[in-house]
Image (cartoon, grey):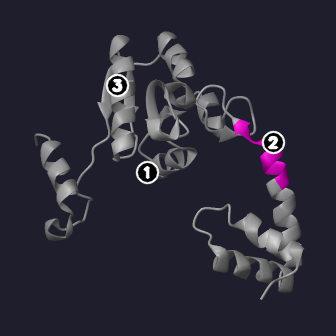
Amino acid sequence: MSFSPLINHLITALRCLPGVGPKSAQRMVFHLLERDREGGRQLSQILEEAISKVGRCEQCRTLCEEPICRLCNNPARDHSLLCVVETPADVMAVEHTGGYRGVYFVLMGHLSPLDGIGPEDLGVSLFRSRLARGEIREVILATNPTVEGEATAHYFAELIKEQEIRVTRIAHGVPFGGELEYIDGGTLARALLGRAPI
């Protein structure tokens, strides 16, 4: 069965979201049109406003509405400690731990030559200038433990070493509360390689 052109366009538009397939998009459209038109209006207004007003922080590249984000502007943060992450969602994940008080640099991706993503796409020029200011004492590389994330971490580690700044990598391995028999081989091998003295 074919829906009206406008409904089809709306279903197609919602499929741009990650994890939303045709059936999920169709359910969302019918929910908004049948049960929550006011919610749909509010969603469209906020989405339009966010798309026009949200940009990137001039220092860390995370998403924000101001030229400098609230984390970079916060004098209570340790501005000598810089955590490099792939996405703004990673910033939120680290912030939710409550254990990190430094600042961030958001790559907005990872190195991927096959997809045409090189160092300049990750803000390497801004990163170099930030290091050159001389306030950074340590850089924590918190890219994902994927092939691309590891390559990205290695590339940035080499840049950082040129500046004679301490560079560290977040640990990867067995999760707290996990049982060894249920851990996959790759994760367990990485945990053994990254073991620390006690």
* Residue in view at x 41 percent, y 44 percent: 99
Q: Position of residue 96 (x, y in %)?
A: 49, 52
Whether residue 112 appears in this view of the structure is no
Main secondary structure type of the part rendered in magenta: helix
Q: Nearer the viewer, mark 2 or mark 1?
A: 2
Q: Secondary structure at mark 3?
A: helix
* Residue in view at x 40 percent, y 41 percent: 143
Which residue is tagged 3?
Answer: 157
Q: Secondary structure at mark 1?
A: helix
Image quarter where the N terminus lies is bottom right
Q: Is residue 45 left or right of residue 86?
A: right
Would you say the residues marked 3 and 2 are in contact, meaning their CB atoms lie under 8 Å apart? no
* Three-letter code for the amino acid on which mark 1 is drawn: Thr
Which residue is tagged 1?
Answer: 97
Tell which of 142 and 114 is nearer to you. 114
The answer to which image quadrant residue 30 occupies is bottom right
For marks 3 and 2 on the same chain, the one whose residue lies earlier in the sequence: 2
Is disc 3 surrounded by few (<14), some (14 to 19) or many (20+) residues within 10 Å?
A: some
Q: CA distance from mark 3 to mark 1?
A: 24 Å
For marks 2 and 1 on the same chain, the one whose residue lies earlier in the sequence: 2
How many marks the image carries: the answer is 3
